[in-house]
Image (cartoon, rainbow, N blue to C red):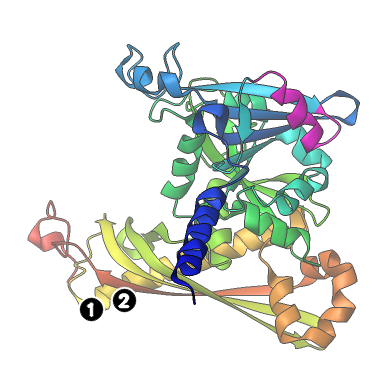
Amino acid sequence: MNPMRKVGRVALALLTLVLSAGCWDSSEVNDLALELAWGIDTAKNEDLMISAQVIAPFRMGSAEGGSSGGGGGGQDKPYFVMSGIGKDTLDAVQQMQTKLSRQVYRAHRRVIVIGEAQARKGLKKVLDTYSRDPNLKLRSDVFIVKGGTAKEFLNVAYPLEDIPGIGALKEYSQIGTLKEMGLINLLISSISDGNCPALPAIAIGSDTTGPEDTDQDGSSGGEGFRIAGTAIFDNELKLLGYIKGSEGKLLRWIKGELSKLIVTAPIEEEEGEVSLDLNKLRSKVLPRFEGDQIKIQVILKGQGMIRENNTNLDLMQPHNLTIAEEALEKQVETSVSQTITKVQEEFGADVFEFGEVIHRKYPSRWKSLREDWDAEFRKAEVSVKADLTIRRIGVTGPSLHLKERNIQK
């Protein structure tokens, strides 16, 4: 080949690479409004209100050094909230965009919050955009605002985080749940025949008038917010009600979505309690049929370390360790059975995904069950078996304050 022609071809190739490099439709960061949390509420005339918690980049540093003590609590918050109303999600976003000098950028979204009123109306109207737009992040967590609206929640400052939406995500992770899987799980539940969604509930106000596991409306005052149980939906994606926070953890253990849990059990003979810090949690659901009766066995396994022993038992003795394990297993079995029965009787919604297990194991039987699975779920007999292992007891067997004569060897 002619050397000059070869040089010409190389030059042409290099020119093509230069001209085609980069993203043809990219936007400069300075032209984007970065949104980390997103809210959905019902509005008048069947419209939707969409709210976004948007980073104010020029205030990020001032929030940390201000007199408020950090966490976005001062007047110079490192975020602001903007809303729009429309016939659907996209229509509301376009209305919101008219109030912003920068293009809303949703790919960094971490949290989606939904007001209780919208959740009771249903979520079907708001899900389509999340499965259709490739720029939207599916790995986001979804929360229901118990007793409030999403817009109210997004405007609440959080003492420990500059961006409050991130505070919700971190609170949720502290209870041992899998992070950033809420939206994916919601979309999966929405196309399943028998399964119903269960989403974490969050309430405005960090101060409570009673224990976390009381059924409150979630509207207590005070700055911040808290995880306030689990919201139960039917298969039409409409909110039915709530279960307590402790019950929600057990629900996630059954579904294999829990990484840690503390179990406290009384040991009646010793008039005291032991607490086990569990990890490596596993679960198995075994369905079977006796005639037309559905029977389901839930097997829960875990291992961990004793964190507190308020009994007279010397846990360095193997037989005492067995006593503690049996008491802890009994406590788990009782609590899980009560949670399952409560959901069956009060809601009739299969948030445990028992139907999916039956579908996989008995596909032919499932065909006759799926059309009326809510009723069949209510009638199913569910038993629970716990298998817990104490791996460590800490640095001492009995409590150090016990006198030698009081220790149960």
Near mark 1 (Cα within 10 A), the count class, few <14, some 14-19 or many ≥20, is few
Image: magenta residue range: 86-100
Near mark 2 (Cα within 10 A), the count class, few <14, some 14-19 or many ≥20, is some
* Image quadrant where residue 384 sits: bottom right
Q: Amino acid at mark 1?
A: Pro
Q: Position of residue 364 (x, y in %)?
A: 83, 87
Q: Position of residue 91 (x, y in %)?
A: 81, 32
Query: Residue 93 magenta-drawn?
Result: yes
* Image quadrant where residue 89 sits: top right
Residue projecting furthest to the left: 404
Helix, strand or loop at mark 2: helix
Q: Nearer the viewer, residue 152 or 348?
A: 152
Residue at the image point whose x is 52% and y is 68% from the top: 333
Up the image or down, 128 lies above or below 305; here it is above
Q: Nearer the viewer, residue 110 or 363?
A: 110
Q: Amino acid at mark 2?
A: Thr
* Image quadrant where residue 298 sits: bottom right
The answer to whether the residue labelled 2 contacts the one labelled 1, judged by CB atoms less than 8 Å apart, is yes
Q: Which residue is mark 1?
A: 318
**Separation of residues labelled 2 and 1 (CA atoms):** 6 Å
Helix, strand or loop at mark 1: helix
Task: Name the disc covering residue 322, or none.
Answer: 2
Residue at the image point whose x is 49% and y is 77% from the top: 1
Up the image or down, 251 lies above or below 47; here it is below
Secondary structure mainly formed by the magenta segment: helix
